Amino acid sequence: MRPPPRRSHRVVRPLWFLLGAVALLLGAIGVVLPLLPTTPFIILAAFAFGKSSPRLETWLVNSETFGPMIADWRAHGAIAPKYKRIALGMMAAAFILSVLMGLAAHILLIQAVCLSGAATFILTRPNGPE
């Protein structure tokens, strides 16, 4: 017999859902706005929906647009080179735009550290199918 669900699960599940919704929104914006990388946000959304909403996870995994990148990630822990190039290019463009906009040095430093961490993560993943 299964123990009754813990009370904290009722609190955590909506937080996972919120994280998934925000990540999906950012990933969708990244499709049309080339300054945001799409792939990491979609992978995060699938993970978060897997913890909160099986229906939305299934919808996302079966999506023609986002499904292949999620499948590559789940099957191989991989990101296709095409998506790596797009993500890295958009991160570079976002940083260059920030410099051109004259953002404060401390903001640029924070952005550089965050983008470098994201780029390192992306570059250290195996290549998925093209």
Image (tube, helix red, strand yellow):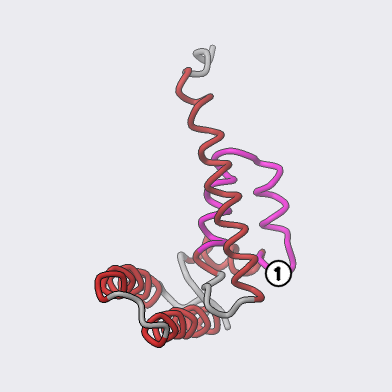
**Res 55 quadrant in image:** top right
Main secondary structure of the magenta stretch: helix
> In the figure, is residue 117 to the left or right of 54?
left
Mark 1 — residue? 65
Is residue 6 shown above or below 18? above
Q: Is-magenta flag for residue 52?
A: yes
Residue visible at 37% across and 77% down?
Answer: 123
Q: Where is residue 106 drawn, in percent x and y?
A: 25, 70
| Number of numbered discs visible in the structure rendering | 1
Quick one: quadrant of the N terminus? Answer: top right
Which of the two residues, 91 or 83, is positioned nearer the viewer here? 91
Is residue 61 shown above or below 125? above
Is residue 61 shown above or below 107? above
Number of residues whose C-alpha sits closer than 10 Å to that of mark 1, classed few (under 14), some (14–19) or many (20 or more): few
> In the figure, is residue 86 to the left or right of 60?
left
Give, as a three-letter code, the residue at label 1.
Answer: Thr
Q: Where is residue 66 drawn, in percent x and y?
A: 66, 66
Which of the two residues, 48 or 98, is positioned nearer the viewer here? 98
Quick one: quadrant of the C terminus? Answer: bottom right
Which of the two residues, 52 or 25, is positioned nearer the viewer here? 25
Residue visible at 49% across and 65% down?
Answer: 40
Mark 1 lies on a secondary structure that is loop
> In the figure, is residue 127 to the left or right of 63?
left
Magenta residues, start to end = 41-66
Q: Where is residue 91 drawn, in percent x and y?
A: 44, 79
Q: Where is residue 14 drawn, in percent x and y?
A: 56, 34
Residue visible at 66% across and 76% down?
Answer: 32
